[in-house]
Amino acid sequence: MLSKPNAQPNQSLIDGIATLQALAVSPEPVGNRELARQLGFNPTRVNRLLKTLSYLGIARQTANRKYTAGPGMHVLAAQSLHASRIMQDALPVLEELRRFGLTIALGVLWRDSVSYLFHAPPGMSTTQGIGRIGLLPATSSGIGMALLAQHDDALIADLFAGREIPGFPNGLDDLLKAIGAVRDEGYARVLVNAAEDRHTVAVPVSHPSFAAVGMSGWIPEQNTGAIVEALKAAAARIGD
């Protein structure tokens, strides 16, 4: 999530990280000009950034001169997860939640999107649930709404200014009203599939929150309280 900078931000670093992230989420190798279009950057600038990332081993160039994640990116991902211990601490707790027979998820907020560190439907093995889903819009996710609610309205308004908001076709006022309800309740309950009457219920982990944990599936309104209590107990253990 963006916050107000305490000093003048380094634009070159911001652009480099934006390029790195775009490369990380691309399902296939991507060319310089295509990546420049996605980012709205000058192709010459993107070319320099990609060559720098390639030099560092964070990106690599394929035989057809496109770019994809390099070994350095995987090392960074593994090292960050190891250093934070979030997955080591979370996996035993998430495994216990599977007794509810619902999809169990753990995610973090990145700008206006949620990245799922863990997402496992009933019947899927724990190992298969690790890192299996890419970025999804935060406003259509219970985990995303639980985490957006930890930020003030001005920051959220800046993030979504002048844009279409997934799940909120009437715009920012409706989103802020929904986020206000999440703050009041202390948890998010989001309809994620109307045809199947599937909801996600999610709560933040720690304070300030760095992640959120949730359960998704057919959750009757009268069962919400028990789900929230279980999630809050899980969040307390993960965030210790």
Image: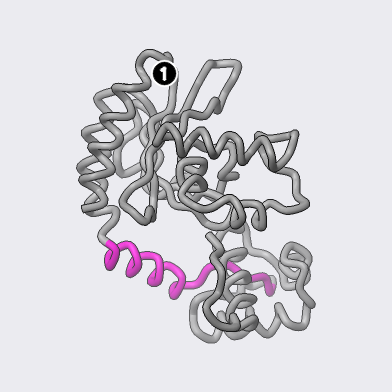
Image point (75%, 70%), residue name: 36
**Label 1 environment density (alpha carbons within 10 Å; few <14, some 14–19, many ≥20):** some
Residue 14 lies in quadrant: bottom right
Query: Helix, strand or loop at disc 1?
Result: loop
Residue 23: x %, y % from top left: 60, 65
Q: Main secondary structure of the magenta part?
A: helix
Image point (29%, 40%), residue name: 126
Residue 233 lies in quadrant: top left
- In-image side of 38 versus 156 (left or right): right
The residue that mark 1 highlights is 219
Above or below, comparing residue 144 to residue 11 in the picture: above
Q: Is residue 198 magenta?
A: no
Image point (42%, 47%), residue name: 107
* Amino acid identity at mark 1: Ile
Above or below, comparing residue 129 to residue 89 in the picture: above
- In-image side of 72 versus 171 (left or right): left
How many labels sit on residues? 1
Image point (21%, 33%), residue name: 96
Residue 100: x %, y % from top left: 29, 23
Residue 95: x %, y % from top left: 24, 36
Give the residues drawn in magenta, as a range.
65-84
Residue 54 visible in rendering: no
Q: Is residue 80 magenta?
A: yes
- In-image side of 120 versus 7 (left or right): left
Residue 147: x %, y % from top left: 46, 47
